[in-house]
Image (cartoon, helix red, strand yellow):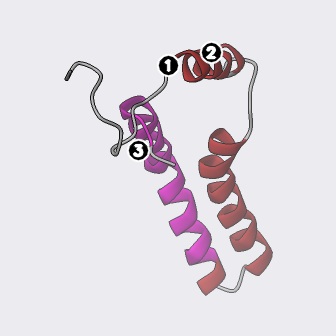
Amino acid sequence: MALGILDTIGLAVTLVFAIPVAIYGLEQLANGEALFGVGLLAVAAAMVLVPRYVTTPDDIPGKAAERVVGSAVKTPEKNEPDEKQE
């Protein structure tokens, strides 16, 4: 799936916070704190994946609008001739 500009910016901001958590989790794994390190890695992964794949109440109007626009607007195929040319 291609990300829009706002989705890309949102992912970048999320990564700013998730990467340090993941690095600290890796450091804890290297120091022998396996449970704490794995827990931090899981938290970092959840920070990135949950907003991407879980639908929240704020997402519902946007998804509904995408369905309406998608059903109303047909994108032309590459092989179809342009209707303006007669």
Q: Residue at x 69, y 44 (%)?
A: 53
Q: Which residues are magenta?
A: 3-28
Amino acid at the residue labelled 2: Val
- For marks 2 and 3, the one nearer the N-term is 3
- The residue beneath circle 3 is 12
Amino acid at the residue labelled 3: Ala
- The residue beneath circle 1 is 73
Q: Position of residue 15 (x, y in %)?
A: 47, 50
Count the labels in the image.
3
Q: Secondary structure at mark 3?
A: helix
Task: Name the disc covering residue 68, or none.
Answer: 2
Q: Are marks 1 and 3 in contact (CB under 8 Å)?
A: no
Q: Residue at x 61, y 69 (%)?
A: 25
Q: Secondary structure at mark 2?
A: helix
Rendering quarter of residue 12: top left
Q: Residue at x 73, y 72 (%)?
A: 38
Q: Position of residue 10 (x, y in %)?
A: 46, 35
